[in-house]
Amino acid sequence: MLEPILETNDLAIGYSARRRPPRLVAESITLRLWPGELVCLLGPNGAGKSTLLRTLAGMQSPLHGGVRVAGADPYRLPPRELARLLGVVLTDRVEVGALSVRALAALGRYPYTDWTGRLTPQDETVIDRALAAVGIAAFASRPVNELSDGERQKVMIARALAQEPKLLLLDEPTAFLDLPRRVELMGILRRLARESGRAVLLSTHDLDLALRGADQLWLFQPGGSIRVGAPEELVLDGAFQAAFHGDGVVFDPHAGAFKFHHPPVGQVDLVGHDLPTLWTRRALEREGFVVNGHDGPRSAVQVEVLNQQCGQTLWRVRHVETWQDFPTLSQAMSGVKACLSLPMTE
Amino acid sequence: MDAALPPTGTEVKLRSEGWRLAVLAGLVLALVGAFLLNLALGSVRIPLSDVAAVLTGGEASKASWAYIVLEFRLPKALTAVLAGAALAVSGLQMQTLFRNPLADPYILGINAGASLGVALVVLATGAATGFLSNVGLLGDLSLIAAAIAGAGLVTGLVIVAARWLRHAMTLLILGLMLGYATGAVVSILIYFSVPEQIQAYISWTFGSFGGVTGRQLAILAPVIGGGLLLAGLLTKPLNALLLGEAYARSMGVNVRRVRFWLIAGTSVLAGAVTAFCGPIAFLGVAIPHLCRALLRTSDHRVLAPATMLMGGLAALLADLVAGVPGSRSVLPLNAVTALLGAPVVVWIVLRRDGPRSDFAT
């Protein structure tokens, strides 16, 4: 019978201060995190993602209810014991001065070494494995302060792995990274969860990555409750749209992404099938047009994406009885706006 | 998996450890050399062979030399080593704890607190007649207790503030304000004191390793020895604190306890030194940076012994310069440490990476 690595029962999180009523962030949180699972914690800014992570990590007391990490109460465990169950990677970018990658990762052995911090051969093996797991074994002797943000984040994860925790908590680990590094990091975390049987919980603003990479989503709902489900379920039943509802942006369940929400400026028919057509659609939607496909209702303006023999793309914009060809997408966009007498951006 | 085999842990360690051992060995040798020079040089120059003879229990060429070496220069040199080591290592601890490259006991107001304690004892009780050298054992203990209490009070305030305030800069301003406040109280005490007491207090603020007798050293040495030992025991959690308190806690550090012992150790070290030698500036802030630059590491297991050795060495050299060998005059020790220390701090600020890279910004 599989035991959950993390479980909360009727947990309420928030901040209590003396002589003031406690500030409740979220309540009735009942969650289970299983071995080998990667879970993304999502929610708008200020919803309480960091508060929940801090509470789960034993850094902050819950207002009500309890947390169990591998069956133990994180608030009662001695720090050393807890550090063997739970590794944490925080948002803050850390300057550590003149430490090598290896020396920084070796700090993760803290709960296992004696008072001098001396590393046994077994500790060295664990550190080597942790560095290899995030793909930075080749940097081991480099000073940390010469690394890029992405590499640095990997070192911090390797350090958490060196603690050999059952549960890895990461607070927005992708925040400072460019898109390729984010995808890469997500891949690493997925592999860590799958191969080692650890549970990985990360908070993120990267909805697209979370939708594609997570086994489960924990989604902060307006009003301080948390919806749990597979990413696709939450999109289909509208929980996603509800959680991130706000002025100016809408979640498009077809694209699985957020879009700017403009009042529509006009209708355009789009004809074509290939990649240029897809990006032409995006360009039109960005400008606030409602784009109809072939079978949609006929609009006054039609854009046809033509592939010529020589491999060049041509945009043909028809308006009522006239048509004009444009060699570039931006010129075509200007052409469409001219047809509808819209103000030009240039 | 990897095309080129990454260096194993042992290889990486060996490469840098050779250099670090060489630096530490060099520091030990330099410390011994500077120690012997301090015994040999001064207003009277004593040949090293005679110094060696006196130290090994033999006869010097002149009877007075044995007296000078054993009764005056030996306690002074030992005090310099202890005080230098104490200030440098507490500077290191404070810089890591507060994650601030400018932190040292002096800047956080701990020495100001100790000064207030001493001023209360010297100026308010009139214990100053023949200051320090003539007060009895009870006087020694009350001075050391006053300095430690003053230092402890200020450190306590700083650490309470450090728990509430997020920004290190606020903390430095707080330390500065505590320094002003204690300075103001000292001014009031001075205003109501007689000139002899003021003279005694002022000369105490110049700083000196020479006022400590062998008997006082018997108190100072175990106190500082204990503080240095504690600093050695705290190197492992200090390394974890390089990542900040939240990370340190997540890696199993009992942050509250470690913070308490760091603060306690630092106040005892800084307080004891300040009580017997006066408020000695610059060693605390400059030596840790010098050691980090020289050893190219932030590992406290290396830095703690290195700062102790380097601190002792710097104090010996400063004392040597302050003594102006071959002349009868003696410069204020604080003037010398500042004159030697200021260029070091300037160099650190102008260094390519700068101290910014040593701590979170």
Image (tube, grey):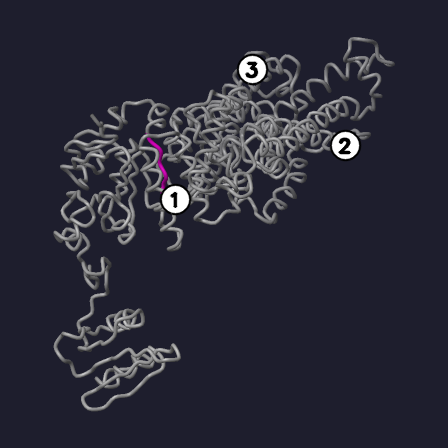
* Apparent side of residue B285 relative to residue A24 in the rendered image (left or right): right
Whether discs 1 and 2 lie on one chain: the answer is no
Query: Residue B143, position in %: x, y?
Result: 54, 19
Q: Position of residue B41 (x, y in %)?
A: 79, 25
Q: Amino acid at mark 3?
A: Gly
Q: Amino acid at mark 2?
A: Val
Task: Name the chain letter of the residue that bears numbered label 3.
Answer: B
Tag 2, which chain? B
Nearer the observer: mark 3 or 1; the answer is 1
Question: In the rendered image, which residue does mark 1 sit on?
Answer: A92
Residue that protrudes farthest toward the front in the picture: A309
Between residue B11 and residue A85, name the one nearer to us: B11
Q: Residue at x 42, y 33 (%)?
A: B158
Give the percent coordinates (x, y) of residue B186: 51, 32
Q: Are marks 3 and 1 in contact (CB under 8 Å)?
A: no
Tell me if B287 is positioned left or right of A29 in this view: right
Q: Characterize the local packing of mark 1: few (<14), some (14-19) or many (20 or more) Cα atoms within 10 angstroms.
A: some
Given residues B218 and A200, the one toward you in this image is: A200
Magenta-span inclusion, residue A69: no
Tell me the amino acid under the disc marked 1. Asp
Label 1 marks a residue whose chain is A
Asked whether residue A90 is drawn in magenta, I would say yes
- Mark nearest the camera among 2 and 3 is 2
